[in-house]
Every structure is written in structure tokens, then in C-alpha cells.
Image (spheres, helix red, strand yellow):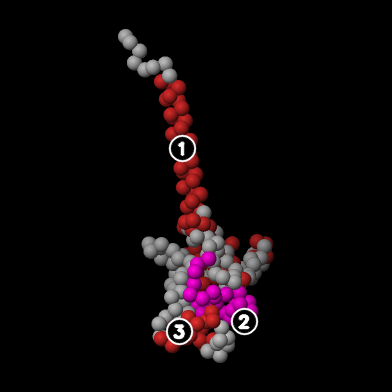
């Protein structure tokens, strides 16, 4: 019987299999890197805004509380984006001649809302409620980073589901006293110090696990 395959067939099969294996690893690796990288998550990236709003100036410089602008963060799923009226409570008197505030004054004069660009967002199929997190001891900076130190606001975390689950699996590591919820520079105490906090960490943890 004549030989069906040429002498080099074994070599061809081996290298083809190796190529498929290596190619699969490369595709999976690159896909994984892209998914977790800034291209998809937009982590660390600034978003273009109507005016160059500085949280650092307003929070650190002027001492504004997060709730002054984000008024519904304790009572609603949405933290709220400040209306032009909120901006004008100060800027109708302060820095009124600065060109950068022209769009704020235009919005005030015309009644057309400012078109702010959301920096942190989740997919439409994900339901996130700000109020339950805030009222259970999750501070703003856990998700948004040290916003009070941001000259221009950027996305501090990926907000991927795997990242969220790090907290939901061990919430006691991320909770803080309610008096520190809106302290964007808050640092968690060492684990042994957490246990000394009147037992509140254990009570909060039980409450969070049953409520989330």
C-alpha cells in the first residue's frame, strides 16, 4: 500500500498543534490584559468636562463637603450631579470675571443645564445604590479614590465585578466610622486597631453581609 502522508506530515502536525496552543494563550492573555487595562476600564483616565472643575480646590481648598454638590448620596441610588444653581451660590459673587466660568454663567442665564460627563459609570444591567453603601459604612473614597486631591477628576478604580466582590467577600476590611464616610483622605487603621473599635466593626460587618 502506498504511503498516504508525506514524510514531513508528522513535523507539520506537531508544529501546527504547537502554533494553535501558543496562539490561544496569546489571544487569551491579550484579551485579559485589554479587559483589565485602562482601554476598557478607563481607570486613571480623565474625562473632558465643560469646565476644568477641581475637586482639590473645592474640597481641600474651600472645605466643601461631598454632600453640598452630591445632595442625594445618602438617600438615593444616584449621588446626584450639581445643578447650575449650586455652582452659582458661590460663583455669582466669586471669580465672576474668569473666562473659564463663562459656560456656567451661560447655563444660568439660559436655563440650559450644564452637560457634565460622568466619570464613574457601570453597565446598564448593574444596579448600584449609593445610599445603602454610604449608610452601611462604605466611604466615598473606597470607590472614587482620594477625590479631594484630584485637580481634574479621573476614574480611580475599574469598577469591574471582580473588584466589587473584593469588598463584598470581606466588608470588614473596607468599612469605616460614619463620621469618616465623606473624608476622602481617610486611611483604614491596622487590623488589630479595627478590633478595638468598641466591637462596632463586627456589628457593622454582620449588618452589611445581611443587607448587601
Give the number of the mark in front: 3 or 1. Answer: 3
Residue that appears at 49% across and 63% down: 209
Residue that appears at 45% across and 25% down: 14
Give the mark, 2 or 1, whose residue is nearer the N terminus: 1
Q: Is residue 119 above or below residue 158?
A: below
x, y percent for residue 183? 60, 74
How far apart in space, not on screen, are marks 3 and 1 (Cα)? Answer: 55 Å
Q: Which mark is residue 180?
A: none
Question: Foreground: 42 or 173?
Answer: 42
- Residue at the limit of the structure toward the left, as seen here: 1
Residue that appears at 64% across and 67% down: 187
Q: Is residue 42 above or below residue 92?
A: above
The answer to which quarter of the image holds residue 154 is bottom right
Please, what secondary structure does the residue beneath circle 2 have? loop
Q: What residue is disc 2 on?
A: 62
Please state the extent of the stretch shown in magenta in the rendering.
46-73
How far apart in space, not on screen, are marks 2 and 1 (Cα)? Answer: 55 Å
Q: What residue is disc 3 on?
A: 106
Residue 63 falls within the magenta-colored stretch: yes
Q: What residue is disc 1 on?
A: 23
Please, what secondary structure does the residue beneath circle 3 have? helix
Residue 182 appears in the picture as rendered: no
Residue that appears at 50% across and 60% down: 42
Amino acid at each position: 500500500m502506498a504511503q498516504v502522508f508525506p514524510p514531513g506530515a508528522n513535523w507539520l502536525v506537531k508544529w501546527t498543534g504547537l502554533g494553535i496552543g501558543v496562539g490561544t494563550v496569546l489571544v487569551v492573555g491579550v484579551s485579559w490584559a485589554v479587559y483589565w487595562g485602562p482601554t476598557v476600564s478607563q481607570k486613571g483616565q480623565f474625562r473632558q468636562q465643560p469646565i476644568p472643575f477641581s475637586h482639590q480646590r473645592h474640597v481641600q481648598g474651600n472645605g466643601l463637603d461631598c454632600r453640598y454638590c452630591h445632595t442625594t448620596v445618602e438617600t438615593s441610588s444616584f449621588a446626584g450631579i450639581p445643578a447650575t444653581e449650586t455652582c452659582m451660590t458661590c460663583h455669582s459673587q466669586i471669580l465672576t470675571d474668569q473666562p473659564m466660568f463663562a459656560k456656567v454663567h451661560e447655563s444660568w442665564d439660559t436655563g440650559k443645564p450644564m452637560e457634565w460627563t460622568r466619570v464613574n459609570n457601570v453597565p446598564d444591567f448593574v444596579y448600584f445604590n449609593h445610599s445603602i453603601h454610604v449608610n452601611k459604612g462604605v466611604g466615598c473614597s473606597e470607590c472614587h479614590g482620594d477625590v479631594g486631591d484630584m485637580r481634574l477628576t479621573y476614574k480611580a478604580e475599574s469598577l469591574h465585578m471582580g473588584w466589587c466582590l473584593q469588598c463584598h467577600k470581606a466588608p470588614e476590611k473596607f468599612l469605616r466610622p460614619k463620621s469618616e464616610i465623606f473624608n476622602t483622605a481617610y486611611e483604614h487603621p491596622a487590623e488589630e486597631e479595627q478590633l478595638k473599635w468598641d466591637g462596632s466593626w463586627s456589628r457593622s460587618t454582620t449588618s452589611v453581609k445581611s443587607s448587601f
